[in-house]
Image (cartoon, rainbow, N blue to C red):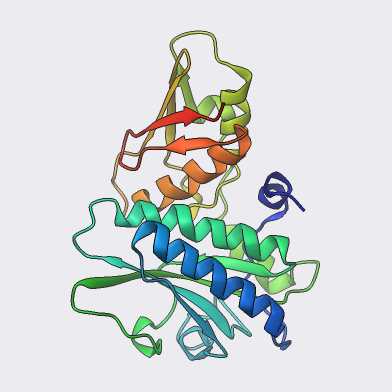
Amino acid sequence: MDLRSAIMERTSRRKYEDIPVDDAIIEQLEAAVWECNRSADLNIKLKIGDGEPFTAGKSYGMFSGVQNYFAMIRKKDDPVGDEKIGYYGESLVLLLTRLGLGSCWVGGTYDKDACHVEVADDEEFRCAIVFGHVKTKESMKERAIKKPLKRKSKEIKDMLTAYADVPNWVVDGVRYAVKAPSAQNRQPVRFLCDGETVSAKVKGEHNYDMVDLGIAKLHFEVGAGGGTWEFGNGGLFTKAE
């Protein structure tokens, strides 16, 4: 499964099977976390067999069977730390999808104090990504939980503003950005295209808008066929040659 297929395949899952993650997969995840931390100066931590923060009483019944998660930790003084969490965290989500595991971004519906994670004074534990084995079809409870959170997904025209003819690679990029997960499914990111110049920004009205910006930027990058984003609200995209 390539990254484009993983984006189309990925869906947020909240009910997990009591099946341990294979050691070989854990090794791949550890390597991916190390690379993310090295590249972005983050302190993402991989936790295996630590489901206490996501038990029914502590997650308001939103999750069941969680045993594994990534603790998404950034430097407090990093002005683009949240965006990095979104961008690199979503790269882990897509890796999980390619490995046949389910996952879900988690902002507030868990007990952060119950997480067995060391956080330095100059760091902030912003959110988590839970993961594990899931059944092919969503359970009735998952569908019931998701229904009130689900809004009609935006279309390409809702997320793209253009001042000239739009290159096909830009349309492709936004087509995959539309599939990006976001807090409360708000899809706050907007892309601006002026010829071959593309930027992405959010209004910053929600606590996780910058995380959502990073997630959407990665999806756009994959859909556009590769390239490099500037970090920052309104950052520009450079298309790969």
Left/right of residue 76 with respect to residue 110 in the rendered view = left
Q: Examine the rendered structure and indicate whether residue 157 appears above or below residue 33.
A: above
Residue closest to the far top: 164
Residue 219, percent across and down? 56, 43
**Residue 111: % across, % down:** 39, 83
* Quadrant of the image containing the C terminus: top right
The image shows residue 166, relative to residue 190, as above or below, that is above
Q: Nearer the viewer, residue 72 or 187?
A: 72
Label tally: 0
Query: Horizontal placement of 49 versus 98: left or right?
Result: left
Which image quarter: residue 171?
A: top right
Q: Is residue 61 left or right of residue 110?
A: right
Task: Tell whether 218 sits left or right of 179.
Answer: left
**Residue 147 at what x, y percent from top left?**
61, 59
Instruction: Identify which residue is drawn at 21% across, 65% down.
Output: 76
Percent x, y of residue 47:
51, 83
Residue 178 seen from this side: no
Residue drawn at x 56%, y 24% is 170
Q: Nearer the viewer, residue 37 or 109?
A: 37
Q: Quadrant of residue 30?
A: bottom right
Identified at 37% across, 57% down, the residue is 40
Residue plotted at (72% across, 66% down): 99
Give the camera-side residue of 149 and 6.
6
In the rendered view, tell whether residue 100 sits above or below residue 117: above
Compared to 203, does 193 lie above or below?
above
Question: Do we see residue 182 in this rendering?
Answer: yes
